[in-house]
Amino acid sequence: MKSYYSYDHIDLWNEEVWKDKISSVYGLVTWMGEHEKREETMYHSPVDGCYGEECRTLSSYTHKTNCVAAPGVIKKWEEMGMCFDCRSQGGVSWFILAPRDCYMNYGKKLETLVVIHNEDINDPYWAMKMLERYDSCSRMAARDKDLILVYIANERPDYDRIYVNILQEAFVAVPGDTERVWLDVSPVYECGMKLKDIPGFVYKDENGRDADPDKAAVRFRESGMWALNITHRWENRVSLSRDQMSKENWSSQAFDLHKLVHSESGRNIAESMVPEYEFDTIEDEGFLRYWSKMGLRYESHDTKFRRWTAAVPEGAFEDRESKLPVICVLQEVNRSNEHLAVTESSYFYEYFRIAAQGECMLINFVLEDADDNDLLVEILEEAFERYPMIDRSRIYAAGHSHNGRYTYEFAFRHPEMIAAISTYGISAGLQPKAMIPMTDEKISHIRKYDMPTICLAGCTEHNLLYPLSKDAKGLRPWQGKAPDFPLTAEDRAKTWQLRLKAHNCPEKTLEEIYETADSKDGAVRNLGIPADKSETMWLDGSEVYIADILNAEGRYHLRVVGEENMPHNTTPVQQKLSWSFMRRFARDLETGKTIELY
């Protein structure tokens, strides 16, 4: 029945439509992931003799990346002037090895070599084993101090193009020269194959003509490794929403893509994909006209070599006396891939429509480190000068996934600036060992401030965030393996207890949380959260579950929203609910107190 519900741009849900916009080295990367042999060996120098889960007790172990950074090994590279920076994204673990000096001078761009290797990331020594395997290449980089190495460990073939996201993040963390990017293709030749024989891989020269990739491959400096120039070939110019909703990596087994596509929500998301499909860069005059027709002036700025953008209602430039609230959207607009900034406007399309109606203006910016995101303070100060219509008492912040964690962190680093926040795609509970650990010290700091917070997520996310009162059931076979991610009802319920503590809300026992599984209230049952006020709504083809929690002062300053049949993606419905919550609050700039506007 749902198949009959159609609309303009429904074809944008079809991957074939985006075929020419997908990274041209995608076929090559997946082939290497499928054919490169994995060496199943134990690391020869375990720290304190620890292997496997024993490593979790080590001070050199990081939970998010499941990585032991052996002190002796790391010290060796540090003494050679190199910085080891280990990260994880989309179930793929990776690290940067780069000259320490490049972190101090982002304006100086360095050549970059990308190495993708099949490695067991369930082994806490995976990074140490890769460092050893590619020791000669790393030593060359340490000697020359003009090369950045990005090492990616494949647990399984990268069918979801995570390597693109990794490189985008890497080029924010370090000043990689996007005009000089190489890929190690040695695994192809080690398998006795030629690059030109890889199915689905077509290599084009700088003029866009088909070229012989084997003639283009070179021995990279004196490393002996075969490398291929992938400059302007590794990027995607696709839709982030479409990718995350259609790729199984970002949803649980219960997600029904067909139901979503043939719904009003699918229609609105398809509309948001149009800019992503039509424009490659925000420098395109057509892109600027697109928003101008809607009533927005879109502008790009740079602060300390970092790009940020603003979207301002045209009427605000005419009425300078009226003040506008601001939503700081923590989503990538950097130049690592010019299409990123276009994607940001599509990803938060509903915010842009809200701004176009004159409700607010947007400032768009994020980096890939909590400390680096403090630059947003300087950006806001610059914005106050550029845009005198800003209401400084009504600055809000919002971000999705790991950017949601950065949003939360920024708000409590600078509570005097932010009136309320929205986090998308992360658990309503607080995790002690998350990307930004919720330590006792941090919880004590958060408790000092009243920060109205709304947490929004899909109910079929890849981490199965809801209900918090039950074990996570229905994960895909490769999901749920992140170390210390709460999968049992007890662990999940404890994260909610931590959230209540942090936001000065009355405590709930584990039993009270478990009892929500049998609640007659649909919102309480589906979220697994004891609510002081709750509501189930039907919006754009999905049920939406809302739980409001009273704090110790009797104020509803904490709200949780779960959207039925939604994977790891922000949606127009969630953005509307986010704005309806945040706009109620302001910050008293003299006392720092929260003001309830209504």
Image: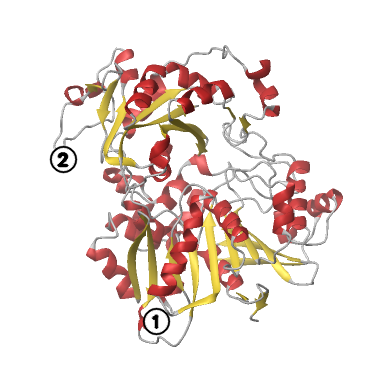
119 displayed left or right of 582: left
* Amino acid type, residue under disc 2 in the picture: Gly
In the drawing, what numbered circle is on residue 73? none
417 displayed left or right of 180: right
Q: Quadrant of residue 408?
A: bottom right
Please say if 554 is above or below 440. Answer: below
Please say if 435 is above or below 561. Answer: above
The residue shown at (46%, 62%) is 378
For residue 108, say whether it is visible: yes
Nearest to the observer: residue 559 or residue 228: 228
Residue 454, percent from left and from top: 63, 63
Nearest to the observer: residue 42 or residue 427: 42
Marks counted in the figure total: 2
Residue designated by label 1: 316
* Amino acid type, residue under disc 1 in the picture: Ala
Task: Give the SS element for disc 2.
Answer: loop
Q: Nearer the viewer, mark 1 or mark 2?
A: 1
Residue 234, percent from left and from top: 31, 38
Q: CA distance from mark 1 to mark 2?
A: 43 Å
Residue 51, percent from left and from top: 65, 18
Nearest to the observer: residue 596 or residue 37: 596
Structural crowding at the residue carrying mark 2, measured as other residues with C-alpha within 10 Å and reported as few (<14), some (14–19) or many (≥20): few
In the drawing, what numbered circle is on residue 208? 2
Q: Quadrant of residue 352?
A: bottom left
First in sequence, mark 1 or 2: give its number: 2
For residue 499, say whether it is visible: no
Q: Are marks 1 and 2 in contact (CB under 8 Å)?
A: no
Please say if 302 is above or below 21. Answer: below
Nearest to the observer: residue 530 or residue 558: 558
Structural crowding at the residue carrying mark 1, measured as other residues with C-alpha within 10 Å and reported as few (<14), some (14–19) or many (≥20): many
The residue shown at (81%, 49%) is 514
